[in-house]
Image (cartoon, rainbow, N blue to C red):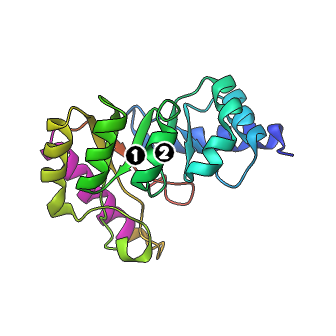
Amino acid sequence: MIDADAVAANVALARQRIAAAAGGRQVRLVAVTKGFGPDAVSAAAAAGCDAIGENYAQELLAKRAAVDAAGLPVHFIGQLQTNKVRQLTGIVTVWETVDRDRLVDELARRAPGGRVLVQVDAAGEAAAGKGGCRPDEVPALVARARAAGLAVEGLMTVGPTSGAEAAARAAFRAVVELADSLALPARSMGMTADLDI
C-alpha cells in the first residue's frame, strides 16, 4: 500500500526543486508510477501531479480504472512495441518514446492525430536499452510524424546513465537546441536525480 502522505511530501519537495531551477519557465511534473499499484496513481493525483507516466503497456492496462478515475493525462514513457499501440489507444494522452519510422506509421494508423514526442538518444545509450533515435535522425522523423498527421509537440530524452553532471548538461543542452531548431516547445527530460540540471 502506498503512503499518500509520503507521496505528497515528495511531490512538494520536487516542486520546490523545479521552481528553484526553472527560472520562471513552465514545467509539468509527470509522476512515474511504474512498479507501483493503482493506489500510486490516486496518490499522485491527490498530490497535484500534472500527469501520470507509465513505462510498460501491461502495467498501464492493469491500472486503467485508477487512471480513468484520476482524470490525469497519461504519458507513455517506456520503449513502445508497435503491437502494443492498439491496446493503449484511448488510454495514452502523449506518446513520449517515438523513435522510429515503423512506430510513427503504427501510431498514425491506430491513434490518428496523436500527441507525440520524439525520443532522442542524446547520450548515445540506445544500445543499452534506453531507446531513442540519433540526433541527426530527429528532423526526418519529426517530418514523417507530421506528414502522417501526428501532433509532434517536442522531444524527449533520458539522461546519461553515468550520472555525471557534465554529461547530463551536454545531453540536455543538445536536446534543447535541437527542439529549438525544429520549433518544438515541449522538452521531456530530467528525473528525480537530475531534474535540477
Tell me residue 135's x, y (percent): 20, 62
Q: Is residue 108 left or right of residue 129?
A: left
Among numbered discs 2 and 1, the one appearing first in the sequence: 2
Q: Residue at x 39, y 38 (%)?
A: 23
Can residue 67 be seen here? The reply is: yes
- Viewer-side residue, 118 vs 4: 118
Assign a secondary structure to mark 1.
strand
- Viewer-side residue, 118 vs 19: 118
Q: Quadrant of residue 114?
A: top left
Q: Which residues are magenta?
A: 167-183
Identify the residue position indicated by label 1 in the image. 96
Up/down of 123 relative to 58, above or below: below
Q: Residue at x 76, y 46 (%)?
A: 37
Q: Are marks 2 and 1 in contact (CB under 8 Å)?
A: yes
Per the rendering, the mark at residue 76 is: 2
Can residue 33 be seen here? The reply is: no
Q: Residue at x 49, y 55 (%)?
A: 78
Tell me residue 56's x, y (percent): 57, 53
Q: Residue at x 48, y 49 (%)?
A: 84
Assign a secondary structure to mark 2.
strand
Looking at numbered disc 1 in the image, what kind of residue is underneath it?
A: Glu
Up/down of 53 relative to 129, above or below: above
Magenta region, main secondary structure = helix
Looking at numbered disc 2 in the image, what kind of residue is underneath it?
A: Phe
